[in-house]
Amino acid sequence: MASAELQGKYQKLAQEYSKLRAQNQVLKKGVVDEQANSAALKEQLKMKDQSLRKLQQEMDSLTFRNLQLAKRVELLQDELALSEPRGKKNKKSGESSSQLSQEQKTVFDEDLQKKIEENERLHIQFFEADEQHKHVEAELRSRLATLETEAAQHQAVVDGLTRKYMETIEKLQNDKAKLEIKSQTLEKEAKECRLRTEECQLQLKNLHEDLSGRLEESLSIINEKVPFNDTKYSQYNALNVPLHNRRHQLKMRDIAGQALAFVQDLVTALLNFHTYTEQRIQIFPVDSAIDTISPLNQKFSQYLHENASYVRPLEEGMLHLFESITEDTVTVLVIFFLVLLLGTGKHLTSYLCFLRKILPYQLKEEECESSLCTSALRARNLELSQDMKKMTAVFEKLQTYIALLALPSTEPDGLLRTNYSSVLTNVGAALHGFHDIMKDISKHYSQKATIEHELPTATQKLITTNDCILSSVVALTNGAGKIASFFSNNLDYFIASLSYGPKAASGFISPLSAECMLQYKKKAAAYMKSLRKPLLESVPYEEALANRRILLSSTESREGLAQQVQQSLEKISKLEQEKEHWMLEAQLAKIKLEKENQRIADKLKNTSSGQLVGLAQENAAVSNAADQDEATAKAVSEPIQSTSLIGTLTRTSDSEVPDVESREDLIKNHYMARIVELTSQLQLADSKSVHFYAECRALSKRLALAEKSKEALTEEMKLASQNISRLQDELTTTKRSYEDQLSMMSDHLCSMNETLSKQREEIDTLKMSSKGNSKKNKSR
């Protein structure tokens, strides 16, 4: 199949290639023709250029001739201008000469006129030839540009087609190679799949035999050991304790908490709405502080005053359910939907009765009968009356659905579990309808409030009361929307939570069975708690190994630290000894310094007295003293450095007399700095050596431990290999024993079949003999 597809593809590609090749030939011919045309046009352009050059040369010659003629005309005009005054002077004497000049003038004028006409004609011809040449040149250039662009486009098309053909050829060759490789791999995979299918068939056969044997064994065990199946009957299965699902219980509590918050907001909004409605009845259309209101409104106000006794139980029932859902309870039934929404059934029924009680008073409003009521206000009042009627109908619908949801709590077979999803969907639709009705009430009441505020008799108390009622209606609308969206978002979870309960349970549990099941759950929890003995605290194996390593390393570091402390104490004692030694040395140096200072002072005194004695001899040895002064100046100016083991000290000659205290401080600081430097170097070297020694010791111990662990692991590996070989031997022996047992059982079955056949034959012979005896007895 793949080869046929490949051949078809190759045939199609060959046909396309032949078509493209023919098109390529045609395009090549067109390109050659265009190239020939462009060459001819280039030749024509060259000819035109040559003719243009000739015309240009003629034009140049004509312009030169015109210039010559113009110069000649100017000369003639000058001569004529010079000859005119002479003719005036010699009019009388030169009449004959004037006649001759007049004739010459006419001749010259005619010649000049001819030359001018000829020049004009040549100018016109040159201009026409130039224009024609420019026009032809522009046409030829535009045609040449178009031909060059077409040739370039044709060449680009040819190059693109050739490139495309080469790419398609390479692509087809690559596809062919890939398909060949793919076909080879598919053949290999097909062979492997055949082998795998054979192996899987063998494994399936073996598994089928094994599972059939296990099934027979389990069925025999069940028939022999199990007295009855308690999940077969729903009455018995209801007493089984379901698996504890803590996540389910926490989710239920979370949902109950959210519903509690929404119900609290809804209850607060309902209380405010009824209370502010009662307050409005007291002040409009008749203010009770000024005049008595009608008996109908008095009765309506009395009923509205009792709203808290009907609305508060909804919140209390919800709070009671939220507190009852804990991790220890088993929330199997779906009665919680009822309380999640609006409290228990009786509380909702009582509130519905309250709404039915006040509905006739809401439908028959006295505001429409008053003279202050306009047509627009009357229309808004009628709309609000219809909205209140719809609101009561929605609560009746909710009460019906919630009664259906609560039915299994009293009658388990009253509602099938399969119908719960449709009931819950209808509850969600009813809640969304309640939200829509509240939005209509909010819109209509806001319109009514704006109309009443425009009335001239509207008081500030009425305006404030209308604002309060409108805010409570808005809060009620928001609460209804939150409850509707909350129920719609959790609808899938409500439907899915129906499956939480005992295994293989198809229906709901009766209240008595649920109570017994909860008692069994408590007993099971107490039993498991009694079995759960507190275990002694133990350290895990890995943590113990880590602690052992830490302990070994800590002992090693402790020993190393002890050695370091001992060595540091020895160093401290040595340093104290050296300190005492250097203090003695410093005292000796101080004494020597005092002696040296005394000697220098005596010497200075002696030198001062010697200067007084040698004043007489200075004049005699002036020449020698000059040389000596220069040498001593050099000696005084250069400092003297003395080096030793303790460092380098720079000093001047004895002729200089430095300050005694500064020199003593300099020597002292130099010795102290040298001592500090040597002690720091010594301490650093000692600490490094101790650290390296401790590291080497720890590494040697770790190496010893690693070798021990390696030996232990090798021994464990040997034991494991021995155990594996032993288990393999046991497996082979057990297989052989099972095979022997199976053969023995088959032999035993064959022998039993033989004995059964013999017994049947004996029974048949006995029957025949009994029949013969009976016939003989009859004949006798």
Image (cartoon, helix red, strand yellow):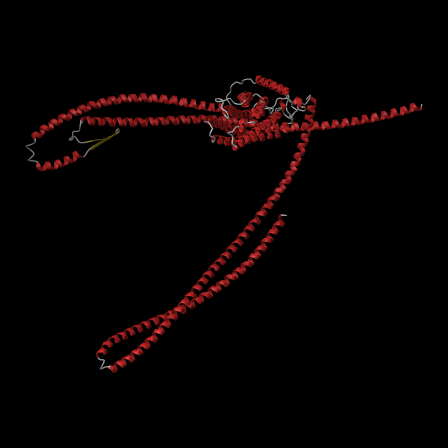
- Residue at 46% of width from left, 63% of height from top? 143
User: Residue 123's quadrant in the figure?
Assistant: bottom left
Can you name the residue that lies furthest to the front here? 371
- 627 to 721, vertically: above or below: below
User: Residue 342's quadrant in the figure?
Assistant: top right
User: Residue 148 location in percent, x, y?
Assistant: 46, 60
Q: Quadrant of the C terminus?
A: top right
Image position of 677 (left or right of 694): left
Judging depth in this view, the residue of 568 and 213 nearest the camera is 213
Residue 386 in view, yes or no: yes
How many numbered tags mark residues here? 0
User: Residue 313 location in percent, x, y?
Assistant: 55, 21
Judging depth in this view, the residue of 169 and 48 nearest the camera is 48
User: Residue 754's quadrant in the figure?
Assistant: top right
Judging depth in this view, the residue of 397 and 110 nearest the camera is 397
User: Residue 447 location in percent, x, y?
Assistant: 50, 32
- 532 to 495, vertically: above or below: above
Judging depth in this view, the residue of 166 and 392 nearest the camera is 392
- Residue at 88% of width from left, 25% of height from top? 771
User: Residue 700 location in percent, x, y?
Assistant: 44, 26
Residue 437 in view, yes or no: no
Can you name the residue that lies furthest to the right here? 780
